[in-house]
Image (cartoon, helix red, strand yellow):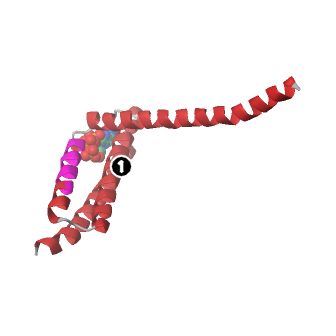
Amino acid sequence: MELSIYHTFWNNIKPLERTMNTIGKHLASYKHGIRGIGLAFHYETIMRFHLAATAGVILVNFLLQISRTEWLITLMLIGLVWMAEVFNTAIEKLADRVTQDQDLLIAHVKDMASGAVSILCLFAVLCALIIYLPYLF
Ligand SMILES: Nc1ncnc2c1ncn2[C@@H]1O[C@H](COP(=O)(O)OP(=O)(O)OP(=O)(O)O)[C@@H](O)[C@H]1O
């Protein structure tokens, strides 16, 4: 009888323990992610430009009193640009680890990673114009 209580207890506690471990791992990955963002700021000065641009966009959004949908679009674009820049920085660092020598493929990899950020920035500017211009004229 006592043994059965023991088994019941452990059978109930194990899933709970597993859940706690999963939550712990999840929280740890957020910690690594935050450290990664800090590292991107450390390696790439352009991250400061993105921060200033983000502050500028948020200020303009408040001043122009844009709609909720327009807020969502601008916030998503800000997030995507930040994400692309952090990926770009990570790819650059990985490429530098592969070789510090002049290498054509490394040049192509870095150019493409940088191109991804440029595409996003171009479309973000187009979206900003489409959203803001009707409020101004
Ligand atoms: N090992 C290499 N071999 C050949 N070309 C390279 C190499 N490293 C960098 N380059 C060239 O120099 C460019 C700039 O690379 P760098 O690592 O200096 O990044 P960055 O100045 O931070 O650029 P970005 O503006 O894309 O963030 C690359 O896009 C690539 O064309």
How far across and how far down the image is residue 89, in percent? 33, 41
Q: Mark 1 sits on what residue?
A: 83
Does the magenta-highlighted stretch encompass residue 51?
Answer: yes
Does the magenta-highlighted stretch encompass residue 108?
Answer: no
Q: Residue at x 10, y 75 (%)?
A: 137
The residue carrying mark 1 has its beta carbon less than 8 Å from ligand 1:
no
- The one of 18 and 36 positioned closer to us in this rendering: 18
Tell me if I can see residue 102 in this picture.
no
Callout 1: helix, strand or loop? helix
The three-letter amino acid code for the residue at tag 1 is Met
Q: Which residues are magenta?
A: 47-58
Which residue lies most toward the top here? Answer: 2
Q: Residue at x 82, y 28 (%)?
A: 5
Q: Residue at x 31, y 67 (%)?
A: 69
- The one of 39 and 79 positioned closer to us in this rendering: 79
Q: Quadrant of ligand 1?
A: top left
Q: Is residue 5 left or right of residue 39?
A: right
How far across and how far down the image is residue 120, in percent? 31, 59
User: From the image, which quarter does the N terminus lie in?
Assistant: top right
- Magenta region, main secondary structure: helix
Q: Residue at x 70, y 31 (%)?
A: 13
What is the quadrant of residue 17 in the picture? top right
How far across and how far down the image is residue 15, in percent? 69, 36
